[in-house]
Image (tube, grey):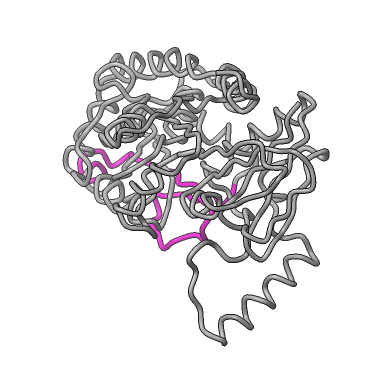
Amino acid sequence: MRKIVFWMPRACMEPAGGFKIVFEYANRLAKDGFPVEIIYPMVHYGARYDWKHAIVYRLIFLWRLIFRTYRPTKWFRVEDSIQQRWLWKLEKYQLKESAVIVATAIETAYSLENYQSKYLEDKFYFIQDFENWSFTDEQVIQSYHFPIKKIVISTWLKDIINSCGETAILIPNGFDFNFFKVKKPITDRNRYEIICMYHKDQRKDFLTAFKAFDIVKKIIPQLHVTLFGVFDKPDLPVWYDYYQRPEKELFNNLYNNAAIYVGSSQIEGWGLTVGEAMQCGCAVACTDNKGYLEMAKDGETALVSPTKDSQALAENIIRLIEDNQLRHTIAMNGNKFIHEFDIEKSYLKLKMFLNGIN
């Protein structure tokens, strides 16, 4: 049984969808008896810094090493049998027994490309997005040509890999249906209750959602918006509530209290929150980025509008509020459809691929 080593791009103290998927798979591998190790680097591939930052980074490195604050302890439980290690950089990692290494982000793929060890059995590249926010488009494409076995989470990413003349196995993200679920009947919900993720990343484009909510509020004064996120509470109107890092039970309740989930991202590798909302029975109004479209089928499982178009997004929200039958149908269809994305099925496929069984 192969040892599996996941190379993370950085410390993982704060929740993130991509990290969560890796940890879900790592836990399942460990429960199945695989030796699993997760490596977190302080400095990523290609990092450049002056002597002042070198001193600061060393102090941060030592602090996290001593107190183990590089791990996702506050938001995700990693199996006790999994070794979690904190290194200065991934290139310093030393294999002491036969293993495969899984790069989980573009910078880790660059680190893995030239990594050599007599114990290294195989290399894998787990691609969860087109990661061009700290690398150029050309560098992202170059990483797809590395002689590393590639795994993608969505159809649109597989299409890009294919267009590069490379191959990848498609393993869609799955959901653990024991975590998020319908607790409050879809037809019993307050139609004016909306839930949305707050994020500062421009790619998530919360500004478009914020503008859409203002448009809806002028037409439907009863509107109430609940936001969740990892950041400190932003300055919000009185008709908003904000929850920072809600615990599991509260998170479920927040989704179940809402009739509508709004997603406004410009780009998503997948869009986990759309799937979570569907699991909990929310009707989804979202933008047409390719990640969302893996789950959001316009007029069937969601109402979909163009990215960066707050007016169109607002109009879809209004449609869902005013048309009870439409809202209930969209929510029920979404809830049924999302159950096709079972993490156990995805995990089985991943396990076989990492274990050398195609």
Task: Write down the quadrant of residue 189 in the picture.
Answer: top left
Q: Is residue 100 above or below residue 177?
A: below
Q: Is residue 164 above or below residue 355?
A: below
Lateral position of residue 321 relative to residue 127, left or right: left
Residue 309 appears at what percent x and percent y?
A: 18, 44
Q: Residue furthest bottom?
A: 52
Q: Is residue 44 above or below residue 344?
A: below
Q: In this picture, is 154 found above or below 219?
A: above
What residue is drawn where x is 51% and y is 84%? 50
Coordinates of residue 150 in the picture (x, y in percent): 47, 34
Q: Position of residue 252 (x, y in %)?
A: 58, 32
Q: Nearer the viewer, residue 35 or 281?
A: 35
In the displayed structure image, the side of residue 192 where residue 314 appears, left or right: left
Viewer-proximal residue, 42 or 163? Answer: 163
- Residue 235 lies in the magenta-colored region: yes
Which corner quadrant of the image does residue 331 belong to? top left
> Which corner quadrant holds the C terminus?
top right
Residue 357 occupies quadrant: top right
- Can you say which quadrant of the picture contains the N terminus? top right
Residue located at (42% from left, 50% from top): 240
Q: Position of residue 123 (x, y in %)?
A: 57, 39
| Left or right relative to 131: residue 39 | right
- Please say whether residue 241 is one of the residues in the magenta stretch: yes
Tally of numbered tags:
0
- Residue range (magenta): 216-245
Residue drawn at 23 percent across, 27 percent down: 319
